């Protein structure tokens, strides 16, 4: 069994600044403290975008320093709040495709991990253009190994209208790239929504969870603005076996009583 950690939506800002009344850097530090204490045996950590809140250089400096504490490799991708150039300055080791997008592949046990870049400067919704989608199609065509797919924006509506409006809106290139390969995509991991959600899309199981700072409140009705909340932050612990992908969501700041249950 292989274990890895999934973190999303860290939203770091300049050092010493607050975001929605919280310090994103301190919240991330407590998240990483929990990972180090309880899951130091994980083989890697994935961070699915919105690493910074406004793409500030100092946010990526802090992120680089914090993630260096982990005893495992870290694989980050970009979200709509990120700045590609500033990210690359502090994470030069992260691969890009031939067009400069932060897209790459990494082995995760017997699975192929494929990491996508849905960042488009100036907009909040996701974009996977023809060039990015062709890169994905080329990777999927290379062999028939099982795939774990990582991206920031979901590519389908989730029933939260305020967030569905800023998902991956033009999905044609993405769906074309997946054509004939969906049965090999064993799980789709994404961020952006700041809520624990699990389901399947076109037969592909998916999961996402809350971010490490602020959250999106559960409002399934039409609202003009995105409703925020201070629900508990989370990260996921993913367990891989040859025939299964199991996702455990952990509220790492929860301090409720622990006790042994009777039979």
Image (cartoon, rainbow, N blue to C red):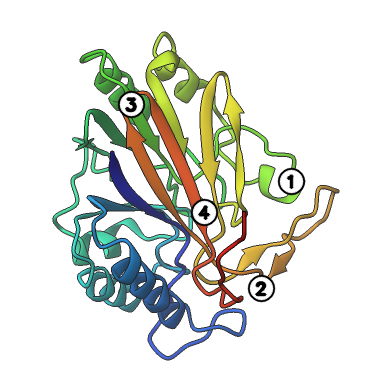
Q: Determine which residue is flagged by label 4.
A: 249
Which residue is more in the foreground, 148 or 58? 148
Residues at discs 3 and 4 in contact (Cβ within 8 Å): no
Residue 150 pos. (x, y %)? 39, 39
Up/down of 85 relative to 66, above or below: above
Q: Determine which residue is flagged by label 2.
A: 230
Up/down of 128 relative to 254, above or below: above
Q: Residue at x 75, y 55 (%)?
A: 218
Pick whichever of labels 4 and 2 is earlier in the sequence.
2
Residues at discs 4 and 2 in contact (Cβ within 8 Å): no
Pick whichever of labels 2 and 1 is earlier in the sequence.
1
> Of helix, strand and loop, which one carries label 1?
loop
Pick whichever of labels 4 and 1 is earlier in the sequence.
1
Q: Determine which residue is flagged by label 3.
A: 147
User: Which class describes the residues within 10 Å of circle 1: few (<14), some (14-19), or many (20+)?
Assistant: some
Q: Is residue 157 left or right of residue 53?
A: right
Q: Which mark is residue 160?
A: 1
Give the quarter of the figure containing the N terminus. top left
Q: Residue at x 68, y 42 (%)?
A: 164
**What is the quadrant of residue 178 in the picture?**
top left
């Amino acid at each position: 069994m292989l274990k890895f950690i999934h973190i999303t939506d860290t939203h770091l800002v300049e050092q010493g600044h607050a975001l929605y009344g919280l310090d994103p850097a301190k919240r991330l530090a407590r998240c990483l403290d929990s990972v180090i204490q309880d899951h130091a045996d994980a083989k890697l950590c994935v961070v699915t975008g919105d690493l910074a809140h406004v793409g500030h250089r100092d946010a990526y400096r802090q992120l680089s320093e914090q993630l260096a504490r982990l005893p495992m490799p870290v694989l980050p991708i970009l979200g709509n709040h990120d700045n590609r150039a500033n990210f690359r300055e502090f994470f030069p080791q992260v691969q890009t495709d031939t067009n400069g997008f932060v897209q790459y592949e990494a082995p995760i046990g017997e699975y192929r991990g494929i990491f996508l870049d849905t960042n488009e400067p100036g907009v909040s919704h996701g974009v996977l253009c023809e060039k990015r989608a062709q890169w994905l199609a080329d990777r999927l065509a290379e062999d028939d190994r099982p795939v774990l797919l990582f991206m920031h924006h979901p590519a389908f509506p989730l029933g939260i209208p305020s967030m569905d409006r800023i998902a991956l809106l033009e999905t044609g290139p993405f769906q074309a790239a997946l054509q004939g390969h969906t049965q090999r995509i064993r799980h789709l991991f994404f961020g952006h929504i700041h809520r624990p959600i699990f389901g399947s899309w076109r037969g592909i199981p998916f999961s996402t969870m809350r971010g490490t700072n602020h959250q999106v409140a559960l409002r399934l009705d039409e609202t003009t603005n995105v409703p925020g909340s201070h629900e508990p932050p989370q990260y996921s612990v993913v367990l891989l076996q040859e025939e299964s992908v199991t996702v455990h969501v952990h509220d790492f700041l929860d301090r409720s009583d622990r006790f042994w249950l009777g039979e």
